[in-house]
């Protein structure tokens, strides 16, 4: 391809660019073409989407927002589809598709995503989901997971008719009941929640959600 300015050949590679995104000057690197004679730099049509994503990510970094890679990696760790992640965050699937690529999210959406990925929020989601599955007529009864649930976890749930107001309260009560430290009970509880998936012959959506949330909570 010839340079539009001096007609010399353009060289393919990864080059620095300076652009404008939503009125903010941004600097970033992207795959493109450059003229070694006059310095003219451009991108192919096939590289335009990646160029836009790099510009959006530069804007996000400048405004301390999660980058597209960070959002995609978080969703991947949860094992969720874009539709499932959108529901988890509380936004539309179109929003997730946009922010995972070339459209920077606004501060409110960024805050919603960060909140949904907060370990404390995930842990509470695991607790609520596990409680619903085992004590409220869900897909898995405690008796059905006796092989994977520790005696401590099963005894703790059997001792209480309703979940506590907060995860912290339940963890402290349950650990006292089991004569374990809160940290030890937390680890046993979350591990059991992960194992629910394999204990269910046909795990429903709630089982999958609990397992996915737990995997991220354990990794946090």
Image (spheres, rainbow, N blue to C red):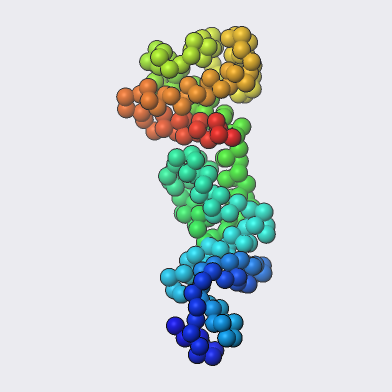
Task: Name the residue furthest bottom.
Answer: 6
Residue 103 percent coordinates (x, y): 54, 60
Q: Choose top left, top right, bottom left or bottom right for residue 159.
A: top right
**Residue 196 image point, x, y percent:** 42, 24
> x, y (%) of residue 109?
59, 50
Task: Report whether residue 94 is seen.
Answer: yes
Above-or-below relation of 143 to 208: above
Residue drawn at point x = 39 percent, y = 33 percent? 205
Which residue of the protein is positioned furthest toward the left in this rendering? 201
Q: Is residue 165 visible?
A: no
Q: At 59% across and 59% down in the image, what residue appears?
A: 57
x then y, percent, for residue 100: 50, 54
Q: Identify the image quadrant of the C terminus.
A: top right
Q: Is residue 115 above or below residue 47?
A: above
- Point out the image quarter for the N terminus: bottom left
State the residue at coordinates (50%, 24%): 191
Residue 178 to residue 107: above or below = above
The residue at 48%/14% (across/down) is: 150
> How many numbered callouts?
0
């Amino acid at each position: 391809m010839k340079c539009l300015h001096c007609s010399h050949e353009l060289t393919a590679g990864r080059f620095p660019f300076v652009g404008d995104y939503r009125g903010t000057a941004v600097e970033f690197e992207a795959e493109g073409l450059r003229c070694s004679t006059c310095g003219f730099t451009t991108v192919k049509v096939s590289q335009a989407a990646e160029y836009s994503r790099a510009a959006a990510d530069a804007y996000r970094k400048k405004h301390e927002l999660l980058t597209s890679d960070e959002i995609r990696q978080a969703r991947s760790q949860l094992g969720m589809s874009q539709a499932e992640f959108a529901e988890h965050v509380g936004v539309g699937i179109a929003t997730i598709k946009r922010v995972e690529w070339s459209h920077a999210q606004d501060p409110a959406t960024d805050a919603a995503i960060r909140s949904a990925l907060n370990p404390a929020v995930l842990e509470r989601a695991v607790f609520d989901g596990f409680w619903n599955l085992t004590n409220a007529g869900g897909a898995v009864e405690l008796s059905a997971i006796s092989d994977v649930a520790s005696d401590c976890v099963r005894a703790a749930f059997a001792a209480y008719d309703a979940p506590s107001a907060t995860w912290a309260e339940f963890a402290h009560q349950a650990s006292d009941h089991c004569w374990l430290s809160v940290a030890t009970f937390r680890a046993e509880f979350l591990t059991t929640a992960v194992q629910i998936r394999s204990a269910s012959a046909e795990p429903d959506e709630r089982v999958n959600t609990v397992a996915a949330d737990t995997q991220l909570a354990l990794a946090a």
